[in-house]
Amino acid sequence: MNEVNIYSFAGMVSAAFFIAKFVEVRFSRTEADATPIKYLVQDAIIVYISVVVINFVMSSLMLGDTVGGGVKHVTEAFTDNPAF
């Protein structure tokens, strides 16, 4: 996420979620499925916070080019003739 600020990215994801849910609720066939806008906004805020938290967790787990807290595993390959 170097090119885009994480907060603007989270805002875009949250806005896309809100629009998708609004369209789903707007075109639902039954009146019982209709959800008030208040709950849609609450869900969009939860999505925003979730994106920011997940980005923080993922950036904490990925240190540099390695995955898993900085443990770098080098695969050994035998490129010489066998010794037997």
Image: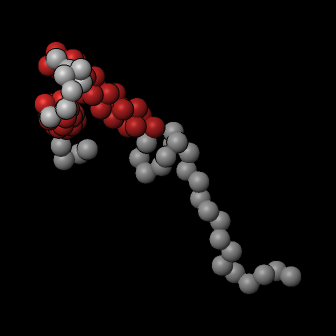
Would residue 79 be found to the left or right of residue 55 on screen?
A: right
Quick one: 76 or 32, which is closer to the camera? 32
Asked if 33 appears above or below 3 in the picture, the reply is above
Which residue shows up at 43% across the image and 42% down it? 62
In the image, what residue occupies the spot 19% across and 32% down? 28
| Residue 1 spot, x, y in % from top left | 26, 44
- For image coordinates 65% across by 65% down, the residue present is 76
> Which of 37/67 is in front?
37
Specify whether residue 77 is in view.
yes
Q: Residue furthest right?
A: 84
Q: Nearer the viewer, residue 7 or 41?
A: 41
Residue occupying image coordinates x 49% and y 46%: 67
Drawn side of residue 81 relative to residue 3, left or right? right
Question: Residue 34's x, y, as percent?
Answer: 19, 22
Residue 72 at what x, y percent from top left?
55, 50
Q: Quadrant location of residue 56?
A: top left
Residue 40, visible in the rendered structure = no
